[in-house]
Image (cartoon, rainbow, N blue to C red):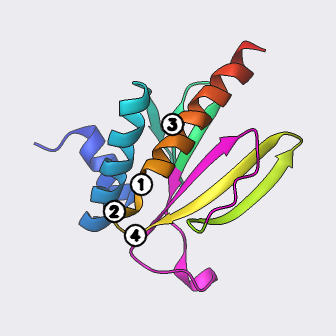
Amino acid sequence: MESVFEKDMDNFFSNQEHLISLFQAVNQMIQSIAPVPFDVNKSQISFGTKPKFAWVWQHKPWLNKRPENAIVLTFCVGRYIEHDQIVEATEPYPGRWIHHLMIRNESELTSDVNKWLDEAYTFANQRARN
């Protein structure tokens, strides 16, 4: 019998095993930083409590020239990061930078990504305390 979690994942990723596998790898990386809950919504999966610090979502390849069979990993830190893996960064509030990565395969979950997610987790916890 399929669990609610499995149904949520299948529905969110439209039964695309490759995307589910990528999400599981991202989740494993995040859980190795700290055991945090995640919420599956209609458009994204968010990590953390309040505030959230990372999100996974599916990009829509017909909206731009980005690859199919990829997920977007988004995280929030207190600085701008310039790196080839980051496809977009915005500062929606002073001192809060949102960065987006396209993840096509597990090899793109590098030590840099792990450091950024750790930084995002720490940044969110500092914001929550203030």
Label placed on residue 72: none
Q: Nearer the viewer, residue 68 or 108?
A: 108
Q: Are marks 1 and 2 in contact (CB under 8 Å)?
A: yes
**Quick one: label 1, few (<14), some, or many (20+) residues within 10 Å?**
few
Residue ID for mark 3: 47
Secondary structure category for the residue under label 4? loop
Q: Are marks 3 and 4 in contact (CB under 8 Å)?
A: no
Residue ID for mark 1: 110
What span is in magenta?
Answer: 56-83
Q: CA distance from mark 1 to mark 2?
A: 7 Å
Of mark 3 and mark 1, the one earlier in the sequence is 3
Foreground label between 3 and 1: 1
Residue ID for mark 2: 107
**Quick one: label 3, few (<14), some, or many (20+) residues within 10 Å?**
many
Q: CA distance from mark 1 to mark 4?
A: 12 Å
Q: CA distance from mark 2 to mark 3?
A: 21 Å
Mark 3: amino acid: Phe
Mark 4: amino acid: Arg
Q: Position of residue 40 (x, y in %)?
A: 45, 43
Foreground label between 3 and 4: 4
Residue ID for mark 4: 104
